[in-house]
Amino acid sequence: MTGERKQSMQIRSKTFVVTGGGNGIGREVVLALLTRGARVAAVDLSEAGLAETVALAPQGAPVTAHALDITDRAAVERLPDEVVAAHGAVDGLVNVAGIVHRFARVQDLSFEEIERVVGVNFWGTVNTVKAFLPRLLNRPEASLVNVSSMGALAPVPGQSAYGASKAAVKLLTEGLYAELRGTSVAVTVVFPGGVGTNILGNSGVTRNSPAASGGERKLTTPPDAARQIVDAVEKGTFRVRIGGDARLLDRLTRLIPQRATALIADRMKSLLD
């Protein structure tokens, strides 16, 4: 973790909204927050995924499930009132929801495929931020966390549109940090490297090569990734890089950006074979 920190936030008894709460990192963030005494509104497109998350929570845990599409702006705009009705307040928003597209060159992707990824990853984040930020600004302490990606730091062949959507999340979050300095809202941007989730399946993407699943890379477990995210909420950390691969790529793209891009392209070219 790097960057300027705000005053620590007390998680116990606070209410957090977590998107992508029906699987993967999002589910583990929900469970980690509950373990630390928070109240949680879990949001996901999948009702079945949310039901499983709730079933995994400690018995009687203060968690509610909200099945909706974060690209549906009207539904997202209704969500703050639903969460407040269930929990009394909203103290934090953790945007984990995200999808990838099939591994293909930009020239081979349809406009619809690109729009779907940008819609979920970028506009979904914008929708929830716009919906909840007024509530967060009225709290004595609050947290806003957006999950970007290692793919926002350098391009991965076959995932250029995904990387662009996550780079947009990165800059949006950094802009929010700049705009919200001096307020009660701590802003965090997260760059996960390889994490052992089923993001391909959840995105409706068929794995087309061993490298698409991370190859022989050591993957961070979803519970470990969630722990680092929740730690960042507590500490008010600005920037979180999850995994040695994300930390290494961050350094390389700062020091030798063109060479790093070529190196990644050479190592990952099998994705497009």
Image: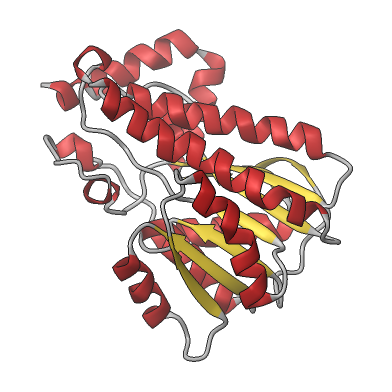
Quadrant assignment, res 259: top left
Q: Tell me, what colour scheme is on the image?
A: secondary structure
Instruction: Say whether residue 223 is visible.
Output: no
Q: What residue is drawn where x is 20% and y is 20%?
A: 269
Image quadrant where one finds the N terminus: top right
Nearest the viewer among 249 and 19 is 19
Q: What residue is drawn where x is 34% and y is 22%?
A: 160
- Viewed as shown, does residue 38 lie left or right of 55? right
- Viewed as shown, does residue 214 lie left or right of 174? left
> Horizontal and vertical percent for residue 205?
19, 41
Residue 238's place in the image compared with 233, above or below, is above
* Number of on-image labels: 0
Q: What residue is drawn where x is 42% and y is 65%?
A: 27
Residue 64's place in the image compared with 133, above or below, is below
Instruction: Say whether residue 172 is visible.
Output: yes
- Give the farthest residue toward the front: 74
Quadrant assignment, res 251: top right
Q: What residue is drawn where x is 39% and y is 53%?
A: 220
Residue 133's place in the image compared with 255, above or below, is below
- Viewed as shown, does residue 18 lie left or right of 161? right
- Viewed as shown, does residue 264 lie left or right of 118? left
> Horizontal and vertical percent for residue 79?
57, 60
Quadrant assignment, res 88: bottom right
> Horizontal and vertical percent for residue 197?
31, 54
> Horizontal and vertical percent for residue 138?
83, 57
Image quadrant where one finds the C terminus: top left
Nearest the viewer among 120 and 76 is 76
- Give the farthest residue toward the top: 258
Residue 94's place in the image compared with 223, above or below, is above
- Give the farthest residue toward the right: 182
